Image (tube, rainbow, N blue to C red):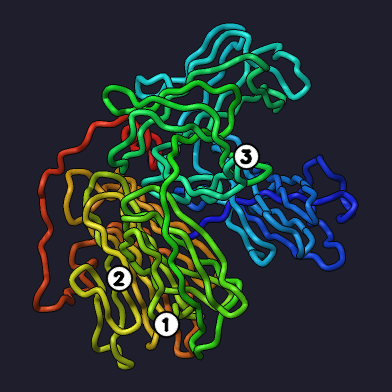
C-alpha cells in the first residue's frame, strides 16, 4: 500500500563504479553497505518500465552523495550504499511518465517505484510562446526563448514537453516525498496538505534537459484536487527538492473563480504543489509481534481521510512511536516492517494528543489489499470469499455487511467515491481458493472507466491489478490466493468480468444486511481533473 520513490546518493569514493553515468550493472557494495533493489513500474497497471532513469541522494556524516542508474529490461536496478546513509531519496523518471520520488531507509531493501503516466506529451518550438493545454485549460503558459540547458545554452531545435497532473486526493502516494517542508527561519519540519500538483519536464531529441533561464518565468495552473473541501482563495506554492526530499515554498497561487484550478508564476520547473501548512497532533503507541515482543524500525503511517496528506515515522528500539496527524480530522493509521503488516485503524483527532490504548500487532503472513477508484461510480465494493471449513463445504464472505470473518477484515469501507477500501487477511487457515473481487454497487459509470485500481501487499511484494478489457459487468474478478495442503500460497490473476453471483461468493451472504445492485444515476461533478484522468488512464 505504500509505494516508495527512490533516489540514492552515493560517493565515488565509497563505491567502485563510475559516478554520473547511467549503468545497468549491479554496484558492488562497499564495506558495511546495503543494496537497494529498485523496480520501476506503471502506477496504474503494474507494468515494468525499462529504461527509467534513477537518481539516489543520501546524507552521510553531513555530506550529500549521489549516484544514478537506468533500469534494465525487467525494470530493475540494484544500487549499493553505506548502511549509515541517512535521508535517502530515490528519484525516478521515464519517457511517457512523470517524475516521482520516495524517501526510504537502508533497511528498505526492495523498493517498488511507481511512476504515473504523463497526461500530455508535446513537441514545440521554444523560440515562440507556447501553451501546454489539457481539456481546454492552459496548464503551463511559456514565454518565447525562455529555456536553457544545464550549461546555459539555448535549444537549437524543438524541445519535447511531458506534463503530468497529480491528484493526491485519490491517493497520497502519487505525491513525491512525505508531505514535509522545513521552516526557513526555525528549521522545524512542518506538514502540508495538498490541493493539487503538476509535474513538467522538457528535453530535446538527444535527451538533454531544459529549464527556465534566469529572470524567466512561466504561468502554471494546477487543477484543484477532486476531493478538496474548502480550498483557500490564495495558497502557498511548493516545489519538491530532489536533493533534500522536502517541499520548498516559493510563491503563491490564486484559486480561479470557478474553483477549477490554482494559478501562479514560477521561475523553474519540477513538481509544483498547491499546499497549506496545518496544525497537527501526535498519536503515540507501540508495535509488537504476535508473541508480544517489541518491534523496532517498522514504518508507521497516517493518511488523511478528509484531507490530502500523510505522515511517516519509524518505531523506536522499544517498539514505541509518535506520529503526526492533522488536528480535528480523520486519519488512517497503519504499520509495516520486516515482521509483517498491521491492520488499518481509523482515528478521529481533535486538539489533544492521542495515546493508543493497546499496541499495534504486526502479522507476519498478512496480506493487505487496497481498492481505489475515481469519482464515478461513487460506490465500489470489496468482496472477499473462500473456504470456511477444512472440508470445503462451507464458505465465508467479507463485504460491507460482514466486515469481519475469521482471519479477514474489511478495515476501511468507502461509499462516496475514490476509496480507499482496505482489506487485511492475517492468514489462510484452510486449503482452497480465496478470491478477491470488486462489485459495482452504485453510479452511472463502470468499474473500468472509473478507473479502478487494486494494490496487493503480500510478504513484501506489491502487485497492481487493473480492470480487464472487454465489456464491463458489475463484477470484476481480480485475483485468487490458492492455498495447497501444506499451506503454501500462490497468487493467481483472475482478470475477468464475472456475474453478480460470483461477486457474492457463489450465492453466499448473511441473511441480513444484503443489498441489491442499484441503478441509481450518479450526478457527476464538473472538473477538468476528473476528465483528464478518465480520458488518459485505462484507455483500452
Comparing 429 with 298, the one in front is 298
Identify the residue at horizontal 21%, vertical 75% (top origin): 402
- Rate crowding at label 3 as few (under 14), some (14 to 19) or many (20 or more) other CA atoms within 10 Å: some
* Numbered mark located on residue 241 in the image: 3
Q: Is residue 265 left or right of residue 343?
A: right
Q: Please tell me which of labels 3 and 2 falls first in the chain.
A: 3
Name above or below for residue 463 compared with residue 513.
above
Name above or below for residue 198 compared with residue 84.
above
Residue 444 is situated, as x and y percent measured from the top left of the image, at 17, 44
Question: Which residue position holds label 2?
Answer: 410
Q: In 3D space, how far apart are the residues under numbered discs 3 and 2 (Cα atoms)?
A: 37 Å
- Furthest residue in direction bottom, as rendered: 391
Question: Which residue position holds label 1?
Answer: 427
Comparing 423 with 13, the one in front is 13
Residue 21 is situated, as x and y percent measured from the top left of the image, at 81, 40
Check whether the beta carbons of the residues at disc 2 and disc 1 lie within 8 A of each other: no
Residue 381 is situated, as x and y percent measured from the top left of the image, at 25, 61
Identify the residue at horizontal 70%, vertical 45% (top origin): 55
- Between marks 3 and 1 in the image, the one whose residue lies nearer the viewer: 3
Amino acid at each position: 500500500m505504500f509505494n516508495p520513490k527512490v533516489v540514492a546518493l552515493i560517493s565515488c569514493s565509497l563505491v567502485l563504479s563510475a559516478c554520473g553515468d547511467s549503468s545497468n550493472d549491479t554496484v558492488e557494495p562497499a564495506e558495511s553497505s546495503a543494496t537497494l533493489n529498485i523496480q520501476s513500474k506503471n502506477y496504474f497497471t503494474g507494468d515494468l518500465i525499462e529504461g527509467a532513469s534513477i537518481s539516489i541522494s543520501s546524507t552521510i556524516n553531513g555530506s550529500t552523495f549521489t549516484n544514478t542508474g537506468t533500469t534494465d529490461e525487467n525494470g530493475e536496478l540494484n544500487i549499493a550504499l553505506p548502511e549509515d546513509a541517512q535521508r535517502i531519496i530515490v528519484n525516478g523518471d521515464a519517457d511517457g511518465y512523470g517524475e516521482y520520488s520516495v524517501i526510504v531507509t537502508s533497511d528498505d531493501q526492495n523498493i517498488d517505484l511507481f511512476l504515473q503516466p504523463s497526461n500530455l506529451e508535446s513537441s514545440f518550438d521554444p523560440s515562440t510562446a507556447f501553451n501546454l493545454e489539457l481539456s481546454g485549460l492552459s496548464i503551463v503558459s511559456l514565454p518565447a526563448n525562455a529555456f536553457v540547458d544545464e550549461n546555459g545554452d539555448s535549444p537549437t531545435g524543438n524541445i519535447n514537453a511531458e506534463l503530468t497532473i497529480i491528484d493526491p486526493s485519490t491517493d497520497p502516494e502519487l505525491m513525491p516525498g512525505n508531505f514535509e517542508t522545513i521552516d526557513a527561519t526555525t528549521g522545524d519540519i512542518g506538514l502540508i496538505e495538498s490541493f493539487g500538483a503538476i509535474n513538467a519536464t522538457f528535453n530535446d531529441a538527444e535527451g538533454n534537459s531544459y529549464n527556465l533561464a534566469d529572470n524567466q518565468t512561466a504561468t502554471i495552473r494546477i487543477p484543484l484536487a477532486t476531493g478538496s473541501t474548502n480550498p483557500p482563495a490564495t495558497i502557498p506554492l511548493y516545489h519538491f527538492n530532489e536533493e533534500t526530499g522536502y517541499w520548498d515554498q516559493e510563491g503563491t497561487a490564486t484559486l480561479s473563480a470557478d474553483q477549477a484550478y490554482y494559478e501562479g508564476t514560477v521561475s523553474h520547473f519540477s513538481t509544483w504543489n498547491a499546499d497549506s501548512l496545518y496544525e497537527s497532533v501526535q498519536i503515540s503507541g507501540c508495535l509488537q509481534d504476535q508473541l508480544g515482543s517489541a518491534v523496532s524500525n517498522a514504518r508507521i503511517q497516517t493518511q488523511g481521510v478528509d484531507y490530502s496528506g500523510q505522515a511517516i515515522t519509524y518505531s523506536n528500539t522499544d517498539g514505541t512511536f509518535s506520529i503526526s496527524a492533522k488536528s480535528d480530522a480523520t486519519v488512517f493509521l497503519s504499520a509495516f516492517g520486516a515482521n509483517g503488516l498491521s491492520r488499518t485503524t481509523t482515528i478521529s483527532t481533535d486538539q489533544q494528543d492521542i495515546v493508543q490504548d493497546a499496541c499495534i500487532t504486526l502479522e507476519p503472513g498478512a496480506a493487505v489489499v487496497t481498492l481505489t477508484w475515481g469519482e464515478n461510480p461513487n460506490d465500489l465494493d470489496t468482496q472477499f470469499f473462500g473456504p470456511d471449513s477444512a472440508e470445503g463445504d462451507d464458505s465465508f464472505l467479507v463485504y460491507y455487511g460482514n466486515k469481519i470473518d475469521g482471519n479477514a477484515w474489511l478495515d476501511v469501507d468507502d461509499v462516496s467515491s475514490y476509496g480507499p477500501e482496505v482489506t487485511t487477511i492475517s492468514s489462510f487457515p484452510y486449503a482452497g481458493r480465496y478470491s478477491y473481487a470488486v462489485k459495482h454497487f452504485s453510479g452511472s459509470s463502470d468499474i473500468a472507466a472509473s478507473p479502478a485500481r487494486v494494490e496487493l501487499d503480500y510478504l513484501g511484494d506489491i502487485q497492481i491489478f487493473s480492470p480487464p478489457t472487454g465489456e464491463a459487468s458489475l463484477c470484476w474478478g481480480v485475483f485468487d490466493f490458492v492455498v495447497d495442503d501444506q499451506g503454501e500460497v500462490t497468487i493467481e490473476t483472475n482478470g475477468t468480468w464475472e456475474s453478480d453471483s460470483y461477486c457474492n461468493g457463489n450465492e453466499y451472504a448473511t441473511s441480513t444486511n444484503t443489498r441489491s445492485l442499484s441503478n441509481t444515476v450518479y450526478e457527476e461533478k464538473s472538473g477538468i481533473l476528473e476528465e483528464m484522468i478518465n480520458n488518459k488512464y485505462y484507455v483500452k
